[in-house]
Structure formats: structure tokens, C-alpha cells
């Protein structure tokens, strides 16, 4: 492995989003925090959900929302811009293989996603206090979630040929799945057939897994962790193949 090349690309990706922190970190942090404040306090009078105060209940979902969105957007925009500007040629002629490209692009996106997610969590702590029921599960869910959506963003960036195609995934796929994924409510309280239909949404199980780790409530199964691991393996294999063959990168 070209460790110097991988580290250089990783540092470049991290510096890229830190160069405009107001857009890449502060803006999503404020947006997610507003969700917490507005929904938390406007609906907080409904009491507790699954045995915890509503304001505390929505924290894991909002952390996951900020983490997933920003990890996805970082790789998708970065890869797509290198194609539009023609700088992808520099990566293709450099001694960088699929592994180095994955480390660089995905590592940078994970850093941004985790940064926004953890900062959102810290803001929430001011209102709800600090509590982690299962630290190891929480850590694994956060890291694996950031990795999965970073790789999915890379796949979107490689596939897309227009800005509209880049915006399709977060607008018409990622946003509905996350908002219908039990971020602001418990899917167990839904009437049938919506409760059963919600189980088909993979984000539901991912949010439930993080909620179990942070609060100790929610689904007692590890389905969310298993789903993240399965998507991680499949997405990584596909991304490796596309980067190795230069799909839509070699003109």
C-alpha cells in the first residue's frame, strides 16, 4: 500500500471541508440543532417515549441524521468535483490504487460526518445531560454508520454525471428514509400496516441500534449493526471494483 499517498489524500480531503467550516460543519450543525430545539420543545409535552423523556429520545436520531448526511455529501461532492474539474486525471496517473483512494476519500468523509454528529451530541448534552448506556455499541454504530454513508456517497459521486444526479440521492432517497426512520418518533407506536412497513426501512434499524447504544432503549436486536456491516461489505466491494476499473473516471 502507498501509505504516503493515502495519507496525503486523506489530509487533502480533511483540509478541503475544514477550509469552509461555516458551510461544511457549522451550517449542518445549526440545522440539526434547530430540529432538536424546535421538535424537542414543541413536542416535548407528549411526555416520555419508550421510558425516556421525548427530548432525550430524539437525540440519537438527530446525531445519526447529521452524521449520515454529511458523510454522504462529502464523498459524493468531492469525487464529482474532481470529475467535473478534470483533476481526477491526477489521481489516475498517481501511484494510488483502490485502497488508497478509499482511505483518502472515505476517511475524509468519515471525519466530517463524525465531527458533525459528535458536535450535535454535545449540543444536545446541554439540554439533556450526558448518558451512554452501551459505550462500545455506540462507538461501533457511529463509526460504521459514518463509513457506510461515506462509501455510498463515493458510489454516487462516481456514477453521477450531472449536479441533478448528485442531488437526487440526498433529496429523494436519503432524506425521506431518515425522516421516516424513527428519528422523531418510535416506530413501535405506529398502527398497522405502517409499523410493519417501517421495518422495511433500513434506517429504522440503524437509528434503533444507535438509540440502544446511547440510551439503552429501543430494539433489543442487533439488526441495525448487522445491516450496517452488510451494507459496508457490499458497498466497499462495489466501490473497489469501480475504482479499480476506472468506471466513469477514465475519459
Image: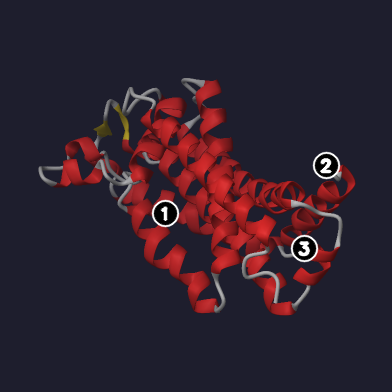
Q: Residue 1 carries which label?
A: 2
Task: Give the quarter of the image for residue 83.
Answer: bottom right
What x and y, as percent, mark residue 61? 41, 43
In the drawing, what numbered circle is on residue 19? Answer: 3
The reply to whether callout 1 and callout 3 are in contact (CB within 8 Å) is no
Q: Where is residue 89 in the image (x, y as percent from the top left)?
A: 79, 71
Mark earlier in primary sequence (3, 2)? 2
Q: Which mark is residue 35?
A: 1
Front label number (3 vs 2): 2
> Is 216 on the left-hand or right-hand side of 187?
right
- Say which of marks 1 and 3 sits in front: 3
Residue plotted at (40% across, 34% down): 224
User: Callout 3: helix, strand or loop?
Assistant: loop
Dot 1: element: helix
Q: Which residue lies furthest to the front in this view?
A: 245
Q: Please determine whether, in this image, residue 58 is positioned above or below residue 51.
A: below
Q: What element carries label 2?
A: loop
Judge left or right: residue 177 versus residue 240: left
Amino acid at each position: 500500500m502507498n501509505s504516503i499517498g493515502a495519507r496525503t489524500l486523506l489530509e487533502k480531503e480533511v483540509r478541503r471541508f475544514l477550509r469552509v467550516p461555516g458551510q461544511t460543519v457549522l451550517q449542518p450543525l445549526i440545522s440539526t440543532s434547530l430540529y432538536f430545539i424546535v421538535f424537542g420543545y414543541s413536542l416535548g409535552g407528549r411526555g416520555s417515549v419508550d421510558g425516556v423523556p421525548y427530548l432525550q429520545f430524539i437525540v440519537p436520531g438527530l446525531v445519526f441524521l447529521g452524521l449520515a448526511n454529511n458523510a454522504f455529501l462529502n464523498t459524493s461532492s468531492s469525487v464529482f468535483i474532481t470529475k467535473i474539474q478534470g483533476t481526477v486525471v491526477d489521481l489516475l496517473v498517481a501511484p494510488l490504487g483502490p485502497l488508497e483512494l478509499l482511505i483518502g476519500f472515505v476517511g475524509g468523509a468519515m471525519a466530517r460526518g463524525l465531527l458533525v454528529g459528535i458536535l450535535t451530541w454535545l449540543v444536545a448534552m446541554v439540554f439533556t445531560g450526558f448518558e451512554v448506556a452501551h459505550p462500545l455499541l455506540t462507538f461501533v454504530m457511529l463509526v460504521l454508520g459514518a463509513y457506510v454513508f461515506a462509501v455510498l456517497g463515493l458510489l454516487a459521486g462516481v456514477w453521477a454525471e450531472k449536479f441533478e444526479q448528485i442531488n437526487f440521492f440526498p433529496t429523494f432517497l436519503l432524506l425521506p428514509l431518515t425522516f421516516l426512520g424513527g428519528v422523531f418518533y418510535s416506530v413501535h407506536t405506529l398502527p398497522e400496516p405502517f409499523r410493519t412497513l417501517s421495518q422495511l426501512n433500513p434506517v429504522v434499524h440503524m437509528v434503533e441500534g444507535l438509540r440502544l447504544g446511547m440510551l439503552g432503549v429501543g430494539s433489543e436486536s442487533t439488526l441495525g449493526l448487522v445491516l450496517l456491516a452488510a451494507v459496508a461489505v457490499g458497498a466497499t466491494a462495489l466501490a473497489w471494483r469501480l475504482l479499480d476499473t476506472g468506471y466513469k473516471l477514465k475519459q
